Image (cartoon, helix red, strand yellow):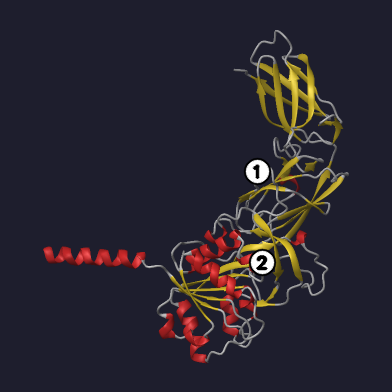
Amino acid sequence: MQGVWRIVVAAMLLALAAQAQPKRVLYVTHSAGYRHDSIPVSVEVLRAGGRVEIVATEDAGMLNAATLRGFDAVLFFTSGELPVNEQQKRDLLEFVREGKGFGGVHSATDTFYTWPEYGDLIGARFNGHPWVQPVRFDVEDPAHPAMAGLGTGFTKLEEVYQFRDFSRDRVRVLMTLDTASVDLNAAGVNPGTEDFPLTWCRRYGSGRVFYSALGHFDSTWRDARFLGMMQEALLWLTGAVDGDAMPRPVRRPLFATRTIGNSASFEPRGTVSPGSLISIYGADLTPGGTMAAEAGWPAAKLAGTTVKLNGVRAPLLYASPVQVNLYVPLEVHGPAVSVELAAPEKVTVPVAGVESTPGIFAVTATREWAILWATGLGVVEPSGEYQVTTLRPEVTVGGEGAQVLYSGLAPGWLGLYQVNVAIPPGTAFPAALLFRFGGHESSVTLRPQ
């Protein structure tokens, strides 16, 4: 019996020792075409990260079955036609297909144009870089470990790639270009394209594939956000952490005029007003992710989705496949407003544009005063340090007229209004508060503590 326990304990110790060994990544930086100056820095910072063991090489001859058995993943920062034979190509594909990882950065898509299977492995082929400038990168799938810590995205100077032979049907897009940060009419831009994926992952047989188009400059590799993404991506590639790589094919968003309304009361449906917070309900409103904007910082794009109102990009506060919350810019007005949602396929529906669409989120009250937190109270005008509504509300409490002390934007909040009301002396509670604004009427019951 003691012999059996010794075997069990020995097996456990061997398993623990195997887990303690760092994952090993073969980092291939052979340049058969353009050689990027940032390669040495990339080697330095990846090694310094300490999350995995990085073995960097310019020797493409290491891409063979015998050598690859000692690694958990291969990472390419390469270009051109690497000097490998047909057997080495088969060895690399088999290495990934049988459960290991393959990653690429930047010019890895500018590699092996004469090897069709490589294009399928990495997911796309380089098709020019129309922009070399500061741009915004938007996170599309915040749930993937490689996107952890990036929030909704970040801005960075980069050489921005575009691609051919790419399909969302084959890969899971993690990060895209915010097209509002570039000129889509620049020379060389793929015509009619507004969807520019820049980071993605996929499964290949039993293995994992990750690619990011970033990495041209030293400053990118020294940026903690990009480096953190790469470190987490390597952990995912080597199987140290898990994350969904199921492709999210493009689907047509489903919503209609009556599924749009102010975020407080959702009435009247199919109607919007300047300065209001509105919600859209439906299906496939994002490519699959769910994301909230950072507090106080609404985003032009969330979870891969954008919304335009009469051609004006709307700031987004929340986006999920079934609901998108957004702010209606004050410049959006008129009797008709087109709502265009792109996720990335576009759908446009018409809604009515009116002066106000009042809705109450909540009421805070004492026996002396009440504050109504609302949206949809229309345009405002300056009054000292505040922005007050051009329309004035009427309020009664317990059937008696109440003095409105303030009606305007809640300082520091987008699309949120506050209405301060003096409670008439002698009011008996609970009391009905009736709020009339721009032809609309709402009622709440006051129960001050």
Residue 349 spot, x, y in % from top left = 78, 52
Whether residue 1 is visible: no
Where residue 197 is drawn, which disc sits there?
Answer: 2
Q: Quadrant of residue 213?
A: bottom right
- Residue type at mark 1: give it: Ala
Whether residue 303 is visible: yes
Q: Nearer the viewer, residue 3 or 99?
A: 3
- Looking at the image, tell me whether mark 2 or mark 1 is earlier in sequence order: 2
- Mark 2 or mark 1, whichever is nearer to me: 1
Name the residue tied to disc 1.
295
Above or below 253: residue 412: above
Q: Measure the C-alpha gap from mark 2 to mark 1.
A: 26 Å
Q: Residues within 10 Å of mark 1 (few under 14, many from 20)?
A: few
Q: Residue at x 74, y 29 (%)?
A: 418
Left or right for 91, reference 104: left
- Residue type at mark 2: give it: Pro
Quadrant location of the C terminus in the rendered image: top right
Residue 192 spot, x, y in % from top left = 79, 69
